[in-house]
Amino acid sequence: MKLAGVMLLMAAASLCCAQEPGDFQPAVTNVPDAQYPKVDSQSRAEIRVKAPDASKVKLNFWSGPKLDMEKQADGYWTVTTPSLAPGLHYYTVIIDGAEVSDPSSYAFFGGGRDASMIEIPEAGATYYTAQDVPHGQVREVWYHSQVTGTWRHALVYTPPGYDTQTRVRYPVLYLQHGAGEDETGWIRQGHANFILDNLIAAGSTKPMIVVMAYGYARRAGVTPPDLTGKPFGSPEMMRAMQEAFAVFEDDMTQALIPFIDANFRTKTDRDHRAMAGLSMGGAQTFQIAFDHLELFSYIGGFSGAGLVFGNQKLDPRTDFHGALADPAAFAKRVHLLWIGVGTDEPPMMKNGLERLHNSLADAKIEHVFYESPGTAHEWQTWRRDLKDFAPRLFQ
Amino acid sequence: MKLAGVMLLMAAASLCCAQEPGDFQPAVTNVPDAQYPKVDSQSRAEIRVKAPDASKVKLNFWSGPKLDMEKQADGYWTVTTPSLAPGLHYYTVIIDGAEVSDPSSYAFFGGGRDASMIEIPEAGATYYTAQDVPHGQVREVWYHSQVTGTWRHALVYTPPGYDTQTRVRYPVLYLQHGAGEDETGWIRQGHANFILDNLIAAGSTKPMIVVMAYGYARRAGVTPPDLTGKPFGSPEMMRAMQEAFAVFEDDMTQALIPFIDANFRTKTDRDHRAMAGLSMGGAQTFQIAFDHLELFSYIGGFSGAGLVFGNQKLDPRTDFHGALADPAAFAKRVHLLWIGVGTDEPPMMKNGLERLHNSLADAKIEHVFYESPGTAHEWQTWRRDLKDFAPRLFQ
C-alpha cells in the first residue's frame, strides 16, 4: 500500500543505478534519494525522466539548452547537456506537448509556477551556502494591508544575534523578487540568508534585517481589468501594469514598512533603510525609492531599473522627480545608487543597463555599475549582485 | 521574449475561460492567475492540463479517484471528479506514463516529491485559515547537529505576543510530519500556525511554541546500507528503518531540543514539553517520548503510534519500557496520551489504532481516542487532530 511504499523511501538510499563513467553526482536540488539529475565536474547535467508511453520528451532550460531526450529500454528518457554556466537554472520537461516539472527536482516558484531547477556548483564559491558560521533566522510574517484589504505574507531575515542583543536596533534592506516569482525567491533560490550570514561573519557587512515582500498586489475593492485581446504593449496592458506597480508601492509604504518598524527592532530613519530588487523588482525599486526618498537612501537595481526597456534615454533633469538634476545634492541625499547586469544577459537588458550606466556617468551621477562575468538573467547574477551590494550598506 | 512574457503574467488576471455552468471557482491552491483546477459547491473538482500530443492522460488522487481525462479540441485534457471529501488532497497527473505534478497547482512536499494538491473547502470550517486575529510567526532556523554532522533546518512557530512579552517563557510542542514529507508539512499543508493563532485567540489554548523538525536523519560518518534487492519487511530493511528512527531520536534529544531551549524563551521542564506526529511521525513520537519520559509529558499519535502495524498487540506490562504497567503511576507521569484516526482511513490503520485504543482501555490506561468523521489518511484528519489536541496541552 501507499503507506508502506513511502516508508520504503525512508531508508532506501542506495537502490539505484550503476555508477556513471566520469564523476556525475546527484544535484543538491534533487528531492531526497533521487539519483537524477546528476552533475559532473565539467558542469554537464544528466536529466532522467520516466515516461514509458511518450512519443517525444524535450528538456527545456529557460535560459539554456533545449534538447530532445532519448528513450531508453527501461521507459526512462535521458539526455546529457553540454557544460552549463554555474548557478541555479530553471527548467521544465515537455512530455508530448505538456510542459511539466521534473519529479526528481525540488520545486521553486518562478515563471508563475512551481518549476524545476538544477544547481550547478561554482568552483570555489562558498558565499551562498551554509558555512560553519553563526546563522540568522528567516521569519514568515503575516501583516494586514489596508491597501489590498487582505492578509499578506512576507519573509524577514534577522541576523545572528538578533534575539539576544535586545538593546540593538538594526538597519533594513527591502529586497524584491522578479516577475513570475514571489516572496520566497530570495531565500529558496537566492540563499540571501546564507549570503548575509557569511558576509556578516567575514566582518565586511553590517548586521541588517532583510525584508522580502510579495511584489504583486490588487487594490481592495477594485475589479482587475479584463485584458482579453489586449496584447503586451497595448495602452490597456501598460495601464494595468502601472496600476499594479502603484498598488505594490502603496502596500509597501503604507502597510509593510509600518508593520516592520512596529514589530522588529529597526532603525527607522532613511539613512538606515535600503531597497533593491531583481528584474521587475529592480524596476519597482527605482519607482518606489525615487518616489519616496524620504524613506530610502540606498537603491539597487539587479538586472532591472527604471528606463531600461526599449530606447528610453535618461533625462537627468526631469526623470525620477528631478532627483538627478543636481549631482552634488544627489550624492549627499542618496548614499548608494547601484545597478548591475550579467554579461550573458539578453541584449535588451544588457544594452538597457549599459545605456543607463553611461547616461548616469554623463550626468555625473555617482553610482556603482557591476557586471557579473559569464552569467545570464539568472540567479547566479543576482547572488553575486547581493554579495557586492550588501557590504556597501549602512557603513 | 521570456521576460516580456512573464511580465504579461503580472496584470493579466482575467484572460481565461468562459464561465462554467454551476459555480466552479478556482481552487485556493492554484498558482496565481491559474483558472484551473476549479472546485464547486458540491466539492467536485475540475482539472485541466495542457498535453496536446499525448495519447493518454490520467488524474491520480493519492487518496481518491483515479480517472481518465478527456482530450479537448484545444489540446487540453479535462475531467470533473465526483464530490470529494473536504480538505487538502495530494494528486498527480499521469501523462503517457509520466507521473508529474499539475503546473497549475502549487507544489507541496509529500510522497517524497513536490506534488500537487487541491484544497476542497469544508463548509463552516475557519479554524485552519487566516482569520482577523493576532498572528504568530513561523521561523526557519538552522542548527548544527553533532549527530548527523550537518546543519539541519527546522520550522518554529512563535505565538502572537512572543516578541513583545519578553519576560514570558512558553511551553513547547514538537510536531512531526509523515513519511515522504518534511519539516514544511505542518505549515504548508497543515496550517498549524493558523490553527494555533485561532485557538489562542479563542482563549481555549495556551500560547505555545511549536517546533517542526525534519524526521529523516543519517548518522555522521555512517554509510547508508545498500538495500538493493531487500524488500520492505526484510530484516535488512527493518534494521535500516530502526536505525533511521534511532538517528532522528538522537538528533532530537541531543541537538534539537538543546538548541530550542538555548535560543527560544522556553519552559524547559517535562511538564511543559509535548510531542505529537502524524503517521510515521506518530510512530516516532511514541518511540521518542516513551524512551524519554524525562523530557515529555504529553504524547500524541495522529494516525500513527507504536504497535499499529500488523497484528501487534499491546503488552502493557513490558511495552514502552513498562511505562503502562501501573495505570495510576502512568496517569500521574503522563498528562495526556492521545491517539486519533480518520473513519475513512485504510483498514490496517483504522483497525490498528482501534486495537491500540481497546488495549489501552483494557489495561485501564487513561488516554484520549479521537475519531475524525469521514476523513482518510490525509491532512484534514490531522488538522482536526491538532485542533482537538492543542487545547488539552499545558492547562
Image (cartoon, coloured by chain):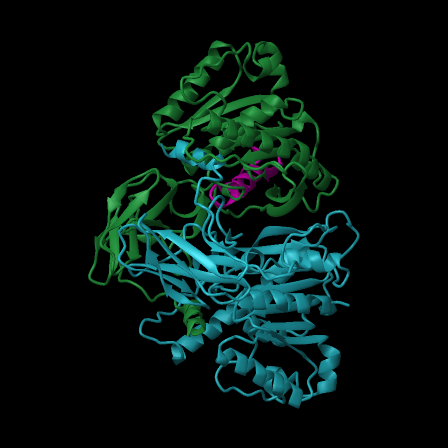
Chain colours: A cyan, B green
Which residues, given as a range, are shown in magenta? B186-211
Q: Is residue A195 above or below residue B341?
A: below
Instruction: Provide residue A329's location: percent of width, then percent of height.
Output: 73, 84
**Horizontal arrangement in the rendering, residue B376 relative to residue A209 (left or right):** left
Residue that extends furthest to the right in the rendered view of this protein? A167
A76 or B203, which lies in front? Answer: A76
Q: Is residue B98 above or below residue B309?
A: below
B187 part of magenta stretch: yes
Q: Residue at x 44, y 71 (%)?
A: B7
Determine if residue A137 is in view.
Answer: yes
B188 or B83, which lies in front? Answer: B188
A346 or B69, which lies in front? Answer: A346
B212 or B321, which lies in front? Answer: B321
Instruction: Provide residue B355's location: percent of width, then percent of height.
Output: 42, 17
Classify the position of the C terminus of chain A by image quarter: bottom right
Instruction: Provide residue B266's location: percent of width, then percent of height.
Output: 69, 36
Q: Is residue A11 above or below residue A17?
A: above
Determine if residue A115 is in view.
Answer: no
Classify the position of the N terminus of chain A by image quarter: top left
**Horizontal arrangement in the rendering, residue A165 relative to residue A31 (left or right):** right
Residue that extends furthest to the left in the rendered view of this protein? B73
